[in-house]
Amino acid sequence: MAKQRTRETDGRSAGWGRETAGGTMQLGGMALRDGVMFMGGSHWAAAVRRPDGGIEVHSGRRPTTPGGRGLARVPFVRGVSRLAESLAVLPAVRRKMGPVLPQEDPRLLAAAGAGALAGTAVRRWPGGSPILKETLVAALTLAPALLTLRDSRVAGYHGAEHKSVAATESGTPARSAGKEHVRCGSMLVAPLLFTSALGNLLLRRFKADRNPAAVLAVGVAGLGVAVEVFSWAARHEGHPLAELVKRPGLELQRMATTREPDESQLAVADAAMNELLRLEGRTRAAAGPAGDLLG
């Protein structure tokens, strides 16, 4: 287990814009309720702002899934495997740092629950166009959570997370980096909504929408396809279709899921990134376009 430590800071962001080390390292991460978590090739590191103003940093080894290396080469399966490995980090973060996950914010939980209930009610409403229903369900499911997230501290830390990754990848100062990132998990929203809607239509067409095994299989398949679409778009920067796929995710980040972070939020992201790079034996590592999804 990697060393745990708590660090005091004066709130200033330090160490941005250093030269990158040779080679590449895959970077992933997510915003926390009052902090940021990053993942590298074999470790994770997280930092949160404590009520007394200090920064608390924890870290550990990144869990792996059985057969993960082999699955990483299988189309439509590799994305699901990578997401599973990323999610497997969260229990360790929760054990060491307490209730810091954004999903534990009562307002966000309430908004997500309200959206899910509204979506279920629309699906069960008799009659109507199935396509229009799925479109309305997507809007009702997403809108409450997005509106709540926009006005939360998490949006600022989300922006700090993206700026930190951009600074690490490019060697530029974090403050001047954009708060949107093309590997953010929000880039999956449009492809996933499309595959989910298509899957639900097919389930109803074959009267399998009440079959748990069929629903699970279609859901996993839809996620695999969505990740492949996302990965293709990330690899084909400048391609008109790739830019079309990325546009909804970038707009979501711009309007709702990220905000310009302040200096104290950048300092927290900097603390987490520095700890991760220390564990990975890097100074400032470059992450290629095939890196993990960011939160």
Image (tube, rainbow, N blue to C red):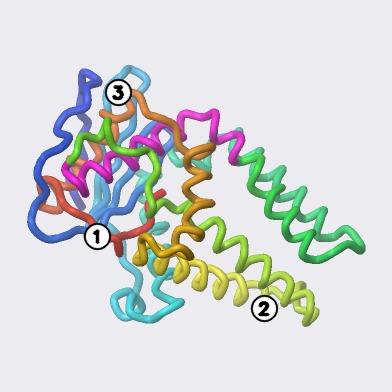
**Residue 148 as seen in the image, left or right of residue 163:** right
Q: Secondary structure at mark 3?
A: helix
Tag 1: residue type? Gly
Q: CA distance from mark 3 to mark 1?
A: 27 Å
Q: Position of residue 260 (x, y in %)?
A: 40, 29
Magenta segment, principal secondary structure?
A: helix
Dot label at residue 214: 2
Which amino acid does the dot numbered 3 rest on? Answer: Glu
User: Residue 163 lies in magenta, yes or no?
Assistant: yes
Name the mark on residue 263. Answer: 3
Q: CA distance from mark 2 to mark 1?
A: 36 Å
Q: Which contiguous range is marked in magenta?
A: 146-171
Which residue lies at the image location 66% right of the left edge and 40% below the top edge? 144
Marks 2 and 3, how far apart at CA: 48 Å
- Residue at coordinates 30% horizontally, 47% vertically from top-left? 38
Q: Residue at the location (62% across, 65% down)?
A: 194
Residue 259 locus on image (x, y percent): 44, 32
Residue 45 visible in the current orientation: yes
In reply to whether residue 238 is colored magenta, the answer given is: no
Disc 2 residue crowd, few under 14, some 14–19, many 20+, Cα 10 Å = some
Q: Amino acid at mark 2?
A: Ala
Rendering quarter of residue 69: bottom left
Q: Position of residue 175 (x, y in %)?
A: 27, 30
Left or right side of 168 for 133: right
Location of residue 83 in the rendering, given as x and y in whole percent from the top left corner = 42, 63
Q: Which of the 4 quarters of the picture holds residue 200?
A: bottom right
Q: Nearer the viewer, residue 179 or 117?
A: 179
Relative to 32, say whether 132 is above or below.
below
